[in-house]
Image (cartoon, rainbow, N blue to C red):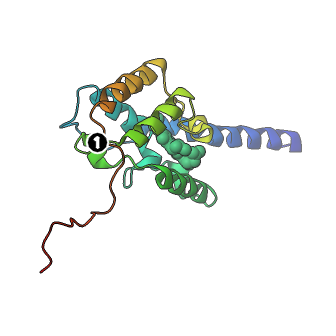
Amino acid sequence: MSKGKITIVFLIIFGLLVLAMPVSNFFLQRQTIEVTSGIPEFKPVSKIMQNKCVDCHTPGMVSEPFYGKLPGASQLIQADIDGAQQQIIFSKEHLKGEKQFSKLELVRIQTVVQNNEMPILPYKMLHWDAGLTNEDREAFLVWIQAQMKTATNAPSPVEVPNEQTPVK
Ligand code: HEC
């Protein structure tokens, strides 16, 4: 084979490998979590989150792509997961509807949904079905509006000792 042909064959193989990354992501197996409580408006939102957000925002729910173990890719993916979970966690209890998001969390979710900031662009480039549709956005906003009525001000990470409790 001439050098030119070898280059073309190489480019085709390389192109197919690159294409295999997003295409294979259409076939990722995902664990599904049933929504067992919460307001009815949350049900469709949990489904959207499970399809489009949990890879980064839910501990233990990443569906790893075939290229996820490759050096370089593995570090990039882990950095996104760490960054995402430092900001906000959609726990399995949240996804089941058992745990409520705080008002602050709802506002932050609303902001990224309205500004179309999530999922982040590199992820959408490799997950072609991960972008939020107008219907998804609508579902988020309807849910947030309804959920706000019962949401509390902030998650309380620490139990504040009750002063009335007698000291033993
Ligand atoms: C590929 C990983 C990834 C996916 C998937 C993803 N996020 Fe994120 N998310 C991040 C990272 C990284 C950050 C922190 C850095 C930033 O804000 O850009 C973040 C931050 C956030 C924040 C906090 C923003 C703030 O500053 O208050 C919210 C809310 C959020 N994401 C919601 C979502 C929602 C909703 C989805 C699904 C529709 C989603 N994310 C999908 C990676 C991801």
Q: Is residue 106 above or below residue 145?
A: below
Disc 1 CB within 8 Å of nearest ligand 1 atom: no
State the count of labels: 1
Q: 54 or 158, which is in the foreground?
A: 158
| Residue 103 seen in this snapshot | yes
Q: In this view, does 144 lie above or below 21?
A: above
Kindly identify the residue that appears in the image at 59 percent across and 60 percent down: 75
**Residue ID at (30%, 38%):** 151
Is residue 130 visible to us here? no
Residue 41 x, y percent position in the rendering: 28, 25
* Between 47 and 11, the one nearer to me in the picture: 47
Looking at the image, which residue is at 87% across and 44% down?
A: 3
Looking at the rendered structure, the kind of residue marked 1 is Gln
Residue 61 placement (x, y as % from top left): 37, 50
Q: Left or right? Give the position of 87 relative to 120.
A: left
Q: Which of 65 and 46 is in front in this view?
A: 46
Q: Which quadrant would the C terminus be assigned to in this image?
A: bottom left
Question: In x, y percent, where is residue 142?
Answer: 36, 22
Question: For residue 135, what is the image quadrant?
Answer: top left
- Residue 36's place in the image compared with 79, above or below, is above
- Residue 67 vs 129, above or below: the answer is below
Q: Crowdedness of circle 1 by 10 Å Cα count: few (<14), some, many (20+)?
A: some
Task: Say which residue label 1 marks.
Answer: 100
Q: Is residue 146 left or right of residue 106?
A: left
